[in-house]
Amino acid sequence: MIFETQRLILKPILESELNTLHKIFADSHIRKYLCDDKIFSWQQIKEMLQHNQKYFEEERFGLWWIREKEEDEILGFVGLWRFFDEKQPQLIYALLPKALNQGYATEAARKIIKYCFDQLGYKYVVASCDRPNLESQKVMKRLGMKQTTEKNIEGKAVLFFRLENRQ
């Protein structure tokens, strides 16, 4: 399940890529917005990759690397992941600081949303972000997602967004 966009290649993250994913999760920017500033251990990332493999095998979704075509450089990741006991997985992405404000998150997320609707048959896609994450809120709006609710989760305001499949 390799996808291409105008500027990007999205490739499933493999269990053998533990070191690379651990480095991304250790980045202070990604920790701030995706991990509540927690540092994930090697074991936690290993378990995440095992779940990723299982998700791809059983449900045809998971996490994909976001790679820039021309430089073949990893910019971050995008995909679908289970959070907050939702009925279906949520859209998720994370970009390294060097890849911010260039439209990569929107471009990669659009491709995953299209896959959700066209291949997985989802009737909607959901996503969430912490209230202070204004950049992710802008991405959600560019994707056409509408805020549906705000919940207090572990003392933090989390915004939930949804995009309906119009087909």
Image (cartoon, rainbow, N blue to C red):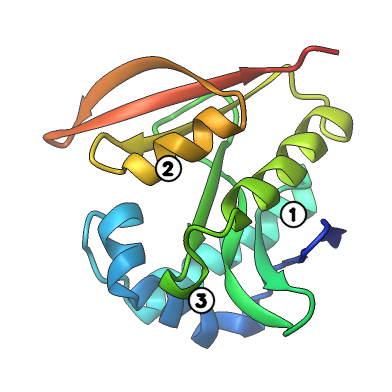
- Residue 117 left/right relative to 113: right
Circles 3 and 2 in contact, beta carbons < 8 Å: no
**Callout 1 amino acid:** Phe
- Residue 74 left/right relative to 7: left
| Residue that carries the numbered disc 3 in the rendered image | 21
Q: Taking the image as drawn, is residue 1 in sight?
A: no
Q: Disc 3 versus disc 1: distance between alpha carbons? A: 17 Å
Judging depth in this view, the residue of 48 and 107 nearest the camera is: 107
The disc, 2 or 1, on the residue closer to the chain's N-terminal end is: 1
Say above or below: 26 vs 113.
below
| Residue that carries the numbered disc 2 in the rendered image | 136
Q: Taking the image as drawn, is residue 138 in sight?
A: yes
- Residue 95 left/right relative to 50: left
* Numbered mark located on residue 56 in the image: 1
Badge nearest the viewer, 3 or 2: 2
The crowding category of the residue bearing disc 3, from other C-alpha atoms within 10 Å (few below 14, some 14 to 19, many at least 20), is many
The crowding category of the residue bearing disc 2, from other C-alpha atoms within 10 Å (few below 14, some 14 to 19, many at least 20), is many
Residue drawn at point x = 39 percent, y = 76 percent:
43
